[in-house]
Amino acid sequence: MKLHANAALSLNGRRRLVRMVIEEGRSIASAASAAGVSERTCSKWVCRYRAAGELGLLDRSSAPGRVHNRTDERLVALLASLRRLRFTAPELADLFGMPVSTISGILKRIGLGRLGRLGLEPAQRYQRARPGELIHIDVKKLGRIYGGAGKRITHARRNPRLRRRDAAGVDRRIIGWDAVHVAIDDATRLAYVEVLPDERATTAIAFLRRAIAFYERHGITVERVLTDNGAPYVSTAHAIACRLLGVRHLRTRPYRPQTNGKAERFIRTLLASWAYGAIYGSTAERTTALDGWLWHYNHHRKHSALGRQPPITRLNNLLGSYS
Protein backbone atom coordinates (compact mmCIF):
# COMPACT_ATOMS: atom_id res chain seq x y z
CA MET A 1 0.00 0.00 0.00
CA LYS A 2 1.42 3.38 -1.00
CA LEU A 3 1.51 6.03 1.75
CA HIS A 4 0.54 9.67 1.27
CA ALA A 5 3.55 11.91 0.82
CA ASN A 6 2.82 13.91 3.97
CA ALA A 7 2.13 10.79 6.07
CA ALA A 8 5.85 9.95 6.31
CA LEU A 9 6.42 13.32 8.00
CA SER A 10 4.20 12.42 10.95
CA LEU A 11 5.38 10.18 13.76
CA ASN A 12 3.18 7.26 12.67
CA GLY A 13 4.30 7.71 9.07
CA ARG A 14 7.94 7.52 10.13
CA ARG A 15 7.22 4.31 12.07
CA ARG A 16 5.61 2.68 9.04
CA LEU A 17 8.48 3.84 6.85
CA VAL A 18 11.09 2.37 9.18
CA ARG A 19 9.07 -0.86 9.62
CA MET A 20 9.06 -1.45 5.87
CA VAL A 21 12.87 -1.35 5.79
CA ILE A 22 13.79 -3.08 9.06
CA GLU A 23 10.96 -5.59 9.62
CA GLU A 24 9.79 -6.27 6.05
CA GLY A 25 13.29 -6.19 4.57
CA ARG A 26 12.45 -3.79 1.77
CA SER A 27 15.17 -1.66 0.20
CA ILE A 28 15.53 2.07 0.87
CA ALA A 29 14.46 2.85 -2.69
CA SER A 30 11.38 0.64 -2.50
CA ALA A 31 10.25 1.98 0.89
CA ALA A 32 10.83 5.56 -0.19
CA SER A 33 8.81 5.04 -3.34
CA ALA A 34 5.95 3.45 -1.38
CA ALA A 35 5.95 6.32 1.12
CA GLY A 36 6.21 9.00 -1.52
CA VAL A 37 9.41 10.51 -0.13
CA SER A 38 12.97 10.76 -1.34
CA GLU A 39 15.55 8.03 -0.68
CA ARG A 40 17.55 10.53 1.36
CA THR A 41 14.59 11.17 3.68
CA CYS A 42 13.95 7.47 4.08
CA SER A 43 17.61 6.78 4.85
CA LYS A 44 17.65 9.58 7.42
CA TRP A 45 14.78 8.15 9.49
CA VAL A 46 16.12 4.61 9.28
CA CYS A 47 19.53 5.73 10.55
CA ARG A 48 17.97 7.70 13.38
CA TYR A 49 15.83 4.73 14.41
CA ARG A 50 18.82 2.37 14.46
CA ALA A 51 20.79 4.87 16.57
CA ALA A 52 18.15 5.86 19.14
CA GLY A 53 15.10 3.65 18.66
CA GLU A 54 11.68 5.35 18.96
CA LEU A 55 13.30 8.53 20.30
CA GLY A 56 15.14 8.91 17.02
CA LEU A 57 11.82 9.39 15.21
CA LEU A 58 10.87 12.46 17.25
CA ASP A 59 11.38 15.98 15.93
CA ARG A 60 14.61 17.63 16.96
CA SER A 61 15.04 21.24 18.03
CA SER A 62 16.06 23.61 15.25
CA ALA A 63 18.30 25.53 17.66
CA PRO A 64 22.00 25.25 16.87
CA GLY A 65 23.96 22.85 19.04
CA ARG A 66 26.66 25.43 19.68
CA VAL A 67 26.49 29.24 19.70
CA HIS A 68 29.88 30.91 19.32
CA ASN A 69 28.78 34.33 20.65
CA ARG A 70 26.60 33.06 23.49
CA THR A 71 26.25 35.45 26.44
CA ASP A 72 28.61 34.63 29.30
CA GLU A 73 26.87 32.70 32.09
CA ARG A 74 28.22 35.10 34.72
CA LEU A 75 26.47 37.96 32.93
CA VAL A 76 23.30 35.87 32.70
CA ALA A 77 23.43 35.29 36.47
CA LEU A 78 23.87 39.03 37.04
CA LEU A 79 20.91 39.80 34.78
CA ALA A 80 18.80 37.30 36.72
CA SER A 81 19.73 38.94 40.02
CA LEU A 82 18.83 42.42 38.77
CA ARG A 83 15.64 41.10 37.20
CA ARG A 84 14.53 39.78 40.59
CA LEU A 85 15.00 43.35 41.85
CA ARG A 86 12.31 44.38 39.31
CA PHE A 87 14.66 45.83 36.66
CA THR A 88 12.93 45.99 33.28
CA ALA A 89 14.52 44.68 30.09
CA PRO A 90 15.02 48.23 28.67
CA GLU A 91 16.69 49.32 31.92
CA LEU A 92 19.04 46.32 31.78
CA ALA A 93 19.77 47.06 28.11
CA ASP A 94 20.74 50.64 28.96
CA LEU A 95 22.83 49.49 31.93
CA PHE A 96 24.90 46.93 30.00
CA GLY A 97 24.81 48.55 26.57
CA MET A 98 23.11 45.55 24.96
CA PRO A 99 20.13 45.34 22.58
CA VAL A 100 16.73 45.02 24.24
CA SER A 101 16.01 41.99 22.04
CA THR A 102 19.08 40.20 23.42
CA ILE A 103 18.14 41.00 27.02
CA SER A 104 14.55 39.89 26.44
CA GLY A 105 15.70 36.63 24.88
CA ILE A 106 17.97 35.85 27.83
CA LEU A 107 15.26 36.66 30.38
CA LYS A 108 12.77 34.48 28.53
CA ARG A 109 15.26 31.62 28.34
CA ILE A 110 15.88 31.64 32.11
CA GLY A 111 12.18 31.91 32.94
CA LEU A 112 12.14 35.57 34.00
CA GLY A 113 10.59 37.04 30.89
CA ARG A 114 7.51 38.53 32.56
CA LEU A 115 7.11 39.49 36.18
CA GLY A 116 4.25 41.91 36.50
CA ARG A 117 1.15 40.90 34.56
CA LEU A 118 1.27 37.11 34.32
CA GLY A 119 -2.18 35.76 33.56
CA LEU A 120 -3.74 39.24 33.35
CA GLU A 121 -5.35 40.90 30.36
CA PRO A 122 -3.37 43.67 28.64
CA ALA A 123 -3.81 47.09 30.21
CA GLN A 124 -6.10 49.53 28.45
CA ARG A 125 -3.98 52.60 27.69
CA TYR A 126 -4.92 56.10 26.60
CA GLN A 127 -2.99 59.27 25.89
CA ARG A 128 -3.97 62.89 25.42
CA ALA A 129 -3.26 64.49 22.05
CA ARG A 130 -1.43 67.66 23.14
CA PRO A 131 0.79 68.78 26.03
CA GLY A 132 -0.99 70.43 28.94
CA GLU A 133 -4.39 69.01 28.06
CA LEU A 134 -4.27 66.94 31.25
CA ILE A 135 -1.81 67.00 34.15
CA HIS A 136 -1.93 64.13 36.64
CA ILE A 137 -1.24 65.20 40.23
CA ASP A 138 -0.80 62.99 43.28
CA VAL A 139 0.99 62.89 46.63
CA LYS A 140 2.86 60.08 48.36
CA LYS A 141 4.03 59.88 51.97
CA LEU A 142 7.71 59.11 52.42
CA GLY A 143 9.36 58.19 55.71
CA ARG A 144 11.97 60.64 56.93
CA ILE A 145 15.53 59.49 57.54
CA TYR A 146 17.17 60.04 60.92
CA GLY A 147 20.54 59.14 62.40
CA GLY A 148 23.81 58.35 60.68
CA ALA A 149 22.92 54.83 59.54
CA GLY A 150 20.45 55.91 56.89
CA LYS A 151 17.45 54.58 58.80
CA ARG A 152 14.00 55.81 58.01
CA ILE A 153 10.88 56.08 60.13
CA THR A 154 8.03 53.93 58.89
CA HIS A 155 5.34 55.24 61.21
CA ALA A 156 4.33 58.70 62.41
CA ARG A 157 5.37 59.81 65.88
CA ARG A 158 2.53 61.68 67.51
CA ASN A 159 4.56 63.27 70.31
CA PRO A 160 6.26 66.40 68.89
CA ARG A 161 8.44 66.69 71.99
CA LEU A 162 10.08 63.33 71.44
CA ARG A 163 13.64 63.91 70.27
CA ARG A 164 16.71 61.81 69.45
CA ARG A 165 20.31 62.88 69.99
CA ASP A 166 22.56 61.97 67.05
CA ALA A 167 26.28 61.16 67.07
CA ALA A 168 27.19 64.85 66.86
CA GLY A 169 25.15 65.62 69.96
CA VAL A 170 22.42 67.45 68.05
CA ASP A 171 18.82 66.94 69.13
CA ARG A 172 16.61 65.91 66.23
CA ARG A 173 12.82 65.86 66.43
CA ILE A 174 11.48 62.50 65.33
CA ILE A 175 8.64 63.18 62.89
CA GLY A 176 7.41 60.42 60.65
CA TRP A 177 6.67 61.59 57.13
CA ASP A 178 7.42 63.91 54.24
CA ALA A 179 4.93 64.40 51.43
CA VAL A 180 6.19 63.91 47.86
CA HIS A 181 3.94 65.89 45.51
CA VAL A 182 4.16 64.86 41.85
CA ALA A 183 2.77 66.21 38.57
CA ILE A 184 3.11 64.48 35.21
CA ASP A 185 1.83 65.55 31.81
CA ASP A 186 -0.39 62.96 30.14
CA ALA A 187 0.86 63.53 26.58
CA THR A 188 4.60 63.96 27.13
CA ARG A 189 5.21 62.35 30.56
CA LEU A 190 7.19 65.45 31.54
CA ALA A 191 7.27 65.34 35.34
CA TYR A 192 7.63 67.83 38.18
CA VAL A 193 8.22 66.77 41.81
CA GLU A 194 8.65 68.48 45.17
CA VAL A 195 9.25 67.13 48.66
CA LEU A 196 7.07 69.14 51.06
CA PRO A 197 6.41 68.83 54.79
CA ASP A 198 2.70 67.95 54.54
CA GLU A 199 -0.26 67.46 52.21
CA ARG A 200 -2.57 70.22 53.39
CA ALA A 201 -4.72 72.18 50.98
CA THR A 202 -2.49 75.28 51.16
CA THR A 203 0.58 73.15 50.45
CA ALA A 204 -1.14 71.45 47.50
CA ILE A 205 -2.22 74.83 46.09
CA ALA A 206 1.31 76.22 46.32
CA PHE A 207 2.65 73.10 44.59
CA LEU A 208 0.05 73.47 41.83
CA ARG A 209 1.14 77.06 41.18
CA ARG A 210 4.78 76.07 40.89
CA ALA A 211 3.93 73.06 38.70
CA ILE A 212 1.97 75.26 36.29
CA ALA A 213 4.91 77.68 36.16
CA PHE A 214 7.26 74.75 35.45
CA TYR A 215 5.19 73.62 32.48
CA GLU A 216 4.86 77.19 31.21
CA ARG A 217 8.66 77.41 31.10
CA HIS A 218 8.54 74.43 28.74
CA GLY A 219 5.93 76.04 26.51
CA ILE A 220 2.99 74.07 27.93
CA THR A 221 -0.28 75.71 28.92
CA VAL A 222 -2.04 73.60 31.54
CA GLU A 223 -5.74 73.15 30.77
CA ARG A 224 -6.87 70.44 33.20
CA VAL A 225 -5.51 68.76 36.32
CA LEU A 226 -6.58 65.33 37.52
CA THR A 227 -6.32 64.31 41.19
CA ASP A 228 -7.82 61.75 43.51
CA ASN A 229 -10.39 62.57 46.18
CA GLY A 230 -7.91 63.30 48.96
CA ALA A 231 -8.60 65.97 51.54
CA PRO A 232 -6.38 68.70 49.99
CA TYR A 233 -8.09 68.35 46.60
CA VAL A 234 -11.74 68.42 47.69
CA SER A 235 -11.36 71.59 49.75
CA THR A 236 -13.02 74.87 48.80
CA ALA A 237 -9.66 76.64 48.82
CA HIS A 238 -8.31 74.27 46.17
CA ALA A 239 -11.38 74.76 43.99
CA ILE A 240 -11.01 78.56 44.19
CA ALA A 241 -7.30 78.32 43.39
CA CYS A 242 -7.97 76.22 40.27
CA ARG A 243 -10.53 78.77 39.10
CA LEU A 244 -8.09 81.66 39.63
CA LEU A 245 -5.31 79.76 37.84
CA GLY A 246 -7.60 79.10 34.89
CA VAL A 247 -7.44 75.30 35.02
CA ARG A 248 -10.25 72.81 35.18
CA HIS A 249 -10.06 70.41 38.11
CA LEU A 250 -11.06 66.77 37.52
CA ARG A 251 -11.21 64.08 40.19
CA THR A 252 -11.08 60.30 39.86
CA ARG A 253 -14.04 58.09 40.60
CA PRO A 254 -14.06 56.80 44.19
CA TYR A 255 -12.04 53.59 44.64
CA ARG A 256 -10.68 53.83 41.09
CA PRO A 257 -7.03 54.85 41.49
CA GLN A 258 -6.21 53.47 38.03
CA THR A 259 -7.94 56.53 36.57
CA ASN A 260 -4.90 58.46 37.77
CA GLY A 261 -2.65 55.61 36.72
CA LYS A 262 0.10 57.67 35.09
CA ALA A 263 0.78 59.46 38.37
CA GLU A 264 0.58 56.18 40.30
CA ARG A 265 3.06 54.51 37.93
CA PHE A 266 5.39 57.48 38.02
CA ILE A 267 5.39 57.38 41.84
CA ARG A 268 6.34 53.72 41.69
CA THR A 269 9.28 54.53 39.42
CA LEU A 270 10.22 57.51 41.60
CA LEU A 271 10.32 55.49 44.81
CA ALA A 272 12.21 52.55 43.29
CA SER A 273 14.86 54.64 41.48
CA TRP A 274 15.27 57.69 43.71
CA ALA A 275 13.82 57.21 47.21
CA TYR A 276 14.88 53.59 47.76
CA GLY A 277 17.39 53.17 44.95
CA ALA A 278 20.31 54.49 47.01
CA ILE A 279 21.41 54.72 50.65
CA TYR A 280 21.09 58.22 52.09
CA GLY A 281 22.50 59.52 55.34
CA SER A 282 19.73 62.03 55.95
CA THR A 283 16.43 63.30 54.61
CA ALA A 284 18.16 66.44 53.31
CA GLU A 285 20.65 64.33 51.34
CA ARG A 286 17.82 62.39 49.74
CA THR A 287 15.89 65.56 48.88
CA THR A 288 19.00 67.10 47.32
CA ALA A 289 19.37 64.08 45.03
CA LEU A 290 15.85 64.56 43.68
CA ASP A 291 16.71 67.34 41.21
CA GLY A 292 19.38 65.25 39.51
CA TRP A 293 17.12 62.22 39.28
CA LEU A 294 14.24 64.28 37.89
CA TRP A 295 16.50 65.81 35.24
CA HIS A 296 17.62 62.32 34.25
CA TYR A 297 14.00 61.15 34.05
CA ASN A 298 12.85 64.06 31.87
CA HIS A 299 15.89 64.33 29.61
CA HIS A 300 17.65 60.95 29.45
CA ARG A 301 15.59 58.04 30.79
CA LYS A 302 14.00 56.14 27.89
CA HIS A 303 10.24 55.71 28.32
CA SER A 304 8.60 52.57 26.91
CA ALA A 305 5.32 54.41 26.20
CA LEU A 306 7.16 57.06 24.14
CA GLY A 307 8.93 54.77 21.69
CA ARG A 308 11.99 54.41 23.93
CA GLN A 309 12.57 58.16 24.01
CA PRO A 310 12.80 60.48 27.04
CA PRO A 311 9.86 62.82 27.76
CA ILE A 312 11.68 65.98 26.66
CA THR A 313 12.04 64.67 23.08
CA ARG A 314 8.36 63.87 22.97
CA LEU A 315 7.65 67.44 24.01
CA ASN A 316 9.89 68.83 21.28
CA ASN A 317 8.23 66.67 18.61
CA LEU A 318 4.71 67.61 19.67
CA LEU A 319 5.60 71.29 19.60
CA GLY A 320 7.10 70.99 16.12
CA SER A 321 10.76 71.31 17.14
CA TYR A 322 12.92 68.34 16.21
CA SER A 323 16.18 69.68 17.54
Image (spheres, helix red, strand yellow):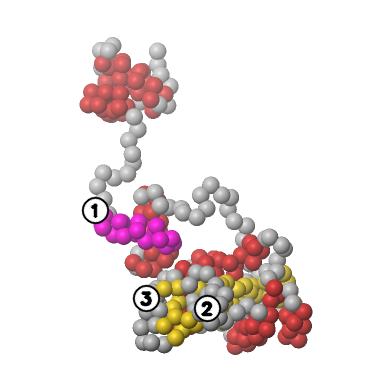
Residue type marked 3:
Ala
> At numbered mark 3, what does the secondary structure look like: helix, strand or loop?
loop
| Label placed on residue 149 | 3
Q: Which residue is mark 2?
A: 175
Q: Which residues are magenta?
A: 72-88
Q: Please tell me whether mark 1 or mark 2 is closer to you in this view.
A: 2
The reply to whether callout 3 and callout 2 are in contact (CB within 8 Å) is: no
Q: Nearer the viewer, residue 103 or 290?
A: 290
The Cα atoms of the two marked residues, 3 and 2, are separated by 17 Å
Q: Is residue 272 above or below residue 68?
A: below
Q: Is residue 8 above or below residue 25?
A: below
For the N terminus, give its image quadrant. Answer: top left
Answer with mark 3 or mark 2, whichever residue precedes in sequence: 3
> At numbered mark 1, what does the secondary structure look like: helix, strand or loop?
loop
Within 10 Å of disc 1 (Cα), the crowding (few <14, some 14-19, many 20+) is few
Q: Is residue 213 left or right of residue 247?
A: left
Q: Where in the figure is residue 128, as x and y percent of width and height? A: 66, 70
Answer with mark 3 or mark 1, whichever residue precedes in sequence: 1
The reply to whether callout 1 and callout 2 are in contact (CB within 8 Å) is: no
Looking at the image, which residue is at 73% across and 84% down? Answer: 241
Q: Where in the figure is residue 143, as x and y percent of width and height? A: 50, 73
Q: Please tell me whether mark 3 or mark 2 is closer to you in this view.
A: 2
Q: Is residue 83 magenta?
A: yes
Q: Is residue 97 magenta?
A: no
Q: Is residue 228 visible?
A: yes
Within 10 Å of disc 3 (Cα), the crowding (few <14, some 14-19, many 20+) is few
Q: Which residue is mark 1?
A: 68
Looking at the image, which residue is at 64% across and 63% down? Answer: 257
The Cα atoms of the two marked residues, 3 and 1, are separated by 47 Å
Looking at the image, which residue is at 64% across and 66% down? Answer: 260
Answer with mark 1 or mark 2, whichever residue precedes in sequence: 1
